[in-house]
Amino acid sequence: QRQLVESGGGWVQAGGSLRLSCAASGSIFVRKAMGWYRQAPGKQRELVASISSTGSVTNYVDSVKGRFTISRDNARNTMYLQMNSLKPEDTGLYYCNGYPSSRYPDWGQGTQVTVSS
């Protein structure tokens, strides 16, 4: 049984930083591409960043390029999202899951990020 646990969210003022963590167990993480996703209030969940199984390839949605960095530690089955220069529009519930998400219908609880102006 796979499990994903997101943590690290919180409240921060615009311009601040947060580092999200995703602890994974089971087959979801091992040798799989992973992604960070977010769901803003009243909007559909969207992909924010993805990372290949080895961590050598990363991709970002345009709105976070240059501000967010996705990384993973395969020895610890953990993935991270470093978020800098946060903006109010980054507010949302952040999830980690396999990539592409269409292959992985189960989601964790997510971690809330709130950025105030």
Image: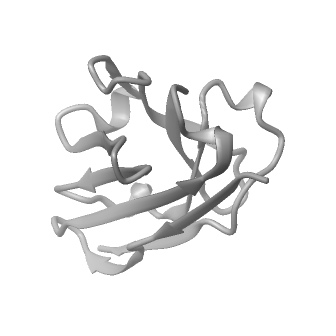
Picture coordinates of residue 117, whole percent (x, y)? 29, 73
Total labels: the figure holds 0
In the image, 48 versus 75, the foreground residue is: 75
- Furthest residue toward right: 105
In the image, 94 versus 71, the foreground residue is: 71
- Furthest residue toward top: 57
Picture coordinates of residue 90, whole percent (x, y)? 41, 56
Looking at the rendering, which quadrant does residue 15 occupy?
bottom left
Looking at the rendering, which quadrant does residue 105 occupy?
top right
> Quick check: 14 left or right of 5?
left
Q: Residue placed at 25% from the left, 44% from the top?
A: 68
- Furthest residue toward bottom: 11
> Quick check: 70 left or right of 103?
left
Looking at the rendering, which quadrant does residue 95 occupy?
bottom right
Q: Residue placed at 35% from the left, 35% from the top?
A: 63
> Quick check: 82 left or right of 24?
left
Q: Residue placed at 17% from the left, 56% from the top?
A: 85
Examine the rendered structure and indicate whether residue 95 appears above or below residue 71.
below
Q: Residue placed at 68% from the left, 69% from the top?
A: 109
Examine the rendered structure and indicate whether residue 12 appears above or below residue 21.
below
> Quick check: 66 left or right of 60?
left
Picture coordinates of residue 32, whole percent (x, y)? 55, 27
The colour style of the image is: one colour
